[in-house]
C-alpha cells in the first residue's frame, strides 16, 4: 500500500514550523494548535508545528470519514440515503442540546450536520470487532476501541495524529484503503464542501470535549486541475478558557494558510 511509504515520508517534513506566517493565524484566533499539509505532486509535507503533527488525540467527528466507509462496507448503511431512525433520546450533557437534529435522517444529512447520535446508532450495529478489523487494515490511529461506549471516537483512548489523518485522506483520494470503489464514490460526494471551476474541497470538521479539553479539527483535501493538497488542522484549549470563536477558527485558520500558500485561490 502507498500508505506504508507515506508513514516514513512523514519524517521528511519541511522545516517551516518556525515561520511566523504559519503561526500568526493561530495567534490571531488566540488558540493553540497546528496545521499539517501535504503537497501531492511535490510529495512535500508542511507543518506549523512538526512535533504536534505526530501527537495523537481523539478524532471526534472527522472519524465520520472512515466511519462512513465502514458503514457502507459492512452493509449497515446501504447508501448515502440510508435512513437512521432517531432513538428518541440522546445525552445532552455529553453532546450539547441540538433539537434541530433530533429526527430520522439520512446518512448524508448526518454527515453534513455532524449528527453524532446517528453515527452512534450505526456503530452499535457495526460492532467493535468489525471496527478493529477495518481500522487496523487501514492503519488508522491506534485502533483502540476498548472504551465501554459505542462512541469511541469522541471519548476514551482512541487517537490519531494530524499526519496520520492526512495519510488516511490520501488513501481516500487514491482509493487504496481496503474499501470498494462504490464506497469511495459515495463518501467523496458526501465530503464536498465547496466546488467550482477552480477546485473541489472535500472535508470534515470535528469537536470533542473529552478530558476537560476542547479538541477541534478540520481535515480534508483540495483537488485542483494540476495538483491535490491535503490538510489537517487541530485546535486544543482548556474547557475553562472561554473562546467563542473556537469553532469558526478551525476553518478560518486553515483557509488563511491555504490561501497564503496558494493552495486555495
Image (cartoon, rainbow, N blue to C red):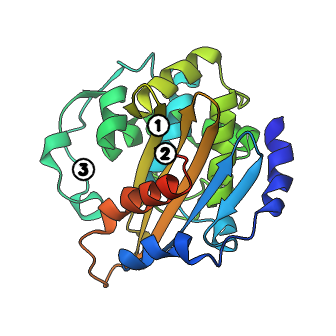
Q: Position of residue 96 (x, y in %)?
A: 23, 60
Residue beneath disc 1 = 201
Camera-nearest residue between 129 and 261 = 261
Residue beneath disc 3 = 90
- Give the spatial CA distance, label 1 vs label 2: 9 Å
State which quadrant residue 3 falls in: top right
- Give the spatial CA distance, label 1 vs label 3: 32 Å
Q: Position of residue 129 (x, y in %)?
A: 64, 40
Q: Nearer the viewer, mark 2 or mark 3?
A: 2
Q: Nearer the viewer, mark 1 or mark 2?
A: 2
Residue beneath disc 2 = 264
Label 1: how many residues lie within 10 Å, few (<14), some (14-19) or many (20+)?
some
Asked if disc 1 and disc 3 are in contact, CB closer than 8 Å, the reply is no
Asked which secondary structure carries label 3, the reply is loop
Asked if disc 1 and disc 2 are in contact, CB closer than 8 Å, the reply is yes
Write the residue at 81% across / 52% down. Answer: 7
Write the residue at 64% across / 35% down. Answer: 227
Amino acid at each position: 500500500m502507498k500508505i506504508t511509504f507515506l508513514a516514513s515520508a512523514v519524517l521528511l517534513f519541511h522545516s517551516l514550523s518556525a515561520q511566523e506566517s504559519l503561526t500568526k493565524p493561530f495567534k490571531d484566533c488566540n488558540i493553540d494548535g497546528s496545521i499539517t499539509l501535504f503537497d501531492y505532486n511535490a510529495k512535500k509535507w508542511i507543518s506549523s508545528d512538526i512535533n504536534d503533527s505526530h501527537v495523537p488525540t481523539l478524532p471526534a467527528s472527522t472519524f465520520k470519514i472512515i466511519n462512513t466507509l465502514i458503514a457502507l462496507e459492512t452493509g449497515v448503511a446501504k447508501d448515502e440515503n440510508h435512513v437512521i431512525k432517531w432513538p428518541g433520546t440522546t445525552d445532552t450533557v455529553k453532546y450539547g442540546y441540538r433539537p434541530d437534529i433530533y429526527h430520522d435522517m439520512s446518512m448524508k444529512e448526518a454527515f453534513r450536520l455532524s449528527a453524532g447520535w446517528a453515527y452512534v446508532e450505526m456503530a452499535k450495529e457495526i460492532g467493535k470487532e468489525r471496527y478493529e478489523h477495518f481500522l487496523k487494515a487501514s492503519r488508522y490511529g491506534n485502533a483502540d476501541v476498548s472504551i465501554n461506549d459505542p462512541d469511541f471516537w469522541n471519548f476514551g483512548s482512541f487517537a490519531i495524529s494530524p499526519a496520520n489523518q492526512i495519510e488516511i485522506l490520501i488513501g481516500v483520494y487514491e482509493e487504496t484503503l481496503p474499501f470498494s470503489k462504490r464506497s469511495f464514490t459515495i463518501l467523496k460526494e458526501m465530503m464536498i464542501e465547496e466546488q467550482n471551476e477552480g477546485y473541489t474541497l472535500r472535508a470534515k470538521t470535528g469537536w470533542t470535549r473529552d478530558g476537560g479539553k476542547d479538541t477541534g479539527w478540520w481535515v480534508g483535501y483540495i483537488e485542483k486541475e494540476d495538483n491535490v493538497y491535503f490538510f489537517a488542522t487541530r485546535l486544543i484549549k482548556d474547557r475553562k478558557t472561554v473562546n467563542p470563536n473556537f469553532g469558526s477558527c478551525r476553518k478560518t485558520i486553515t483557509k488563511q494558510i491555504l490561501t497564503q500558500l496558494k493552495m486555495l485561490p
